[in-house]
Amino acid sequence: MTRRLTMAQAIIEFLRHQYVERDGVERPFFGGSFGIFGHGNVAGIGQALQQYPDFPYHLCRNEQAMVHTAAAYAKMSNRLRTLVCVTSIGPGATNMITGAAAATINRVPVLLLPGDIFARRNVAPVLQQLESPTSQDISVNDCFKPVSRYWDRINRPEQIITALPEAMRVLTSPAETGAVTLALPQDVQAEAYGYPAALLEKRVWTIPRPRGDAAMFRRAVEWIRSSRRPMIIAGGGVLYSEATEALSQLASRSGIPVAETQAGKGSLRYDHEQALGAMGVTGTHAANILAREADLVIGIGTRYSDFTTASKTAFQNPDVRFVNINVAEFDAGKHSALALVADARAALCELGEALAGWQVDAAYRARATQLREEWDAEVSRIYNLRHGPPISQGEAIGVVNRVSGERDVVVCAAGSMPGDLHKLWRTRDPKGYHLEYGYSTMGYEIAGGLGIKMADPSRDVYVMVGDGSYLMMAQEIVTSVEAGYKLNIVVIDNHGFSSIGGLSRACGSGGFGTDYKVHVDFVANAASLGAQVVRAHTREDLESALVAMKGHDRTSVVVVETDINSRVPGYESWWDVPVAEVSESESVRAARAGYEVARVKERHFL
Ligand SMILES: Cc1ncc(C[n+]2csc(CCOP(=O)(O)OP(=O)(O)O)c2C)c(N)n1
Ligand SMILES: [Mg+2]
């Protein structure tokens, strides 16, 4: 039994029939597609998408943005769903590379289908073709190779019979997932082939919950039972595995305090007894002080980025050991850990049983509680600064936190806000905090907000975006208005780069090249893209604008000016940003001296 379809038609027909199942719940893996057509896909993939109207297609405004939208959709869906991104050849394709890198680094699935140059070659060089004098088997799409977890070029229509199942294996694998790129030569997209009917039937991919090795699990339990200052670092894997309840119970019963990475924030409610809040460079004093003293660090679903480890300075106990629970062997082995290659929820449930009756000692528990309470007071202080106007960014975050509902989602990616949100946001729902901080891509915020809203329209989405990020990629406001997905966007206008300006000053360079000389009218700009917009000067203005937005049915924007100099400080942490070793500047030399002292604390965990 075969069906004669073009390669492009067969791909869309295949994608419509892919489902995933976890814990007995089945859902379609693809929520549809985003794209921009050009000559490299309009008559192939474009024609196929038109032929299958039940596979929704949305026009985005920038190809990078749509990959962020797809990645945010996947992250919000705990990687159980994603979107397909289709482009023409050349610049349309390479515009997706930043998005692909962001998805792969954050370990979230996105399927990219860029058009490619003719496989037939006789008409080469075609428009937008990168010619190579050394090979005819090169196109700009080769640039996707290092940023994709699976990459293939479909030079004959029958190659999709083996490529598509491989693409699905990677996309649905919790350990392997990331960007998957299938480069589709323009001529082959339109070629017909008799595809086996079985390829195009419904297929359900089961997402397993692998258990760790039994002997290593027993050793991990012994390590925990014999530790005196254990702490848990919860990463994104806790959320993706839907292990938050299991973590909450284990933490409550054992008293082991829990710190959260950017991707893991929301693993516990902010007011959970054992919640220390953010870990690392952008962490709380509570988390960073206990990390410094910890003799056992239990990393769950974390990839230990430098922001989490404070560039390997966070863990200073000479005897510190690591137990890592991770579905990816690669991450589980970091820091020479006792590596439990396992699903987070499965492992936490088993640990809960194995540790029944065991608790950390009372003095340690009391110390964690005290630090936690101190931190909560510090957040209240910053939320209630009453600076300016212009108001402080910390106050603005406090207002958004207060006005937003328990299940609403805040989204951010780059600038000074990710650090402030990591520290200050009082998370009340596991999916309430959405940071793209693996790649920290300026421009993710609005595009990502759209993906979040599409993944769960029942929640309000609050996009917090700096003026710099906004200027880089605001155009998806148009897409959100067109598609009818309402976003609440807060533009924090501090006239430049608070983050990198501050970093430049800390490195002795005085903020060189980080402020805007021209003030931009963001109100007019956002209005021109179709949003409902107001300006806020005071925190009361901001609050009433946000309250009013709840009644809007269209994407709405509030622009608030903040004081670039009113910063939230760092707490007991450090980040390795190398300072010039020689310079004519006194301030750079002073910064270098401080840098050399701080770097001494960097450790190897062997
Ligand atoms: C695409 C991209 N380019 C450059 C950077 C480096 N970078 C990080 S934050 C930042 C400035 C962000 O400015 P803004 O959005 O105004 O936020 P603020 O720093 O003022 O909080 C820059 C340039 C980045 N993260 N992403
Ligand atoms: Mg700014």
Image (spheres, rainbow, N blue to C red):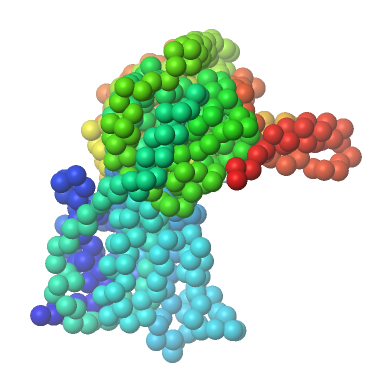
Give 264 or 517, whichever is nearer the viewer: 264
The quadrant of the rendered image in which ligand 1 is seen is top right
Give 468 or 199, whichever is nearer the viewer: 199
Residue 243 image offset from top left, x and y in percent: 30, 35
Task: Residue 511: name its quadrant.
Answer: top right
Q: Residue at x 89, y 40 (%)?
A: 584
Tell me if I can see residue 481 in this picture.
no
Q: Residue furthest left?
A: 1
Residue 416 image offset from top left, x and y in percent: 56, 31
Identify whether 248 is placed above or below 395. Answer: below
Identify whether 217 is placed above or below 19. Answer: above
Residue 494 image offset from top left, x and y in percent: 58, 28
Give 124 or 242, whichever is nearer the viewer: 242
Task: Residue 311: name its quadrant.
Answer: top right
Residue 211 image offset from top left, x and y in percent: 30, 47
Q: Residue furthest right?
A: 584
Q: Residue at x 32, y 71 (%)?
A: 163
Q: Residue at x 42, y 61 (%)?
A: 149
Tell me if I can see residue 105 in this picture.
yes
**Image quadrant for the N terminus?**
bottom left
Q: Is residue 202 left or right of residue 157?
A: left
Q: Is residue 144 left or right of residue 352?
A: right
Identify whether 342 is placed above or below 425. Answer: below
**Image quadrant for the C terminus?**
top right
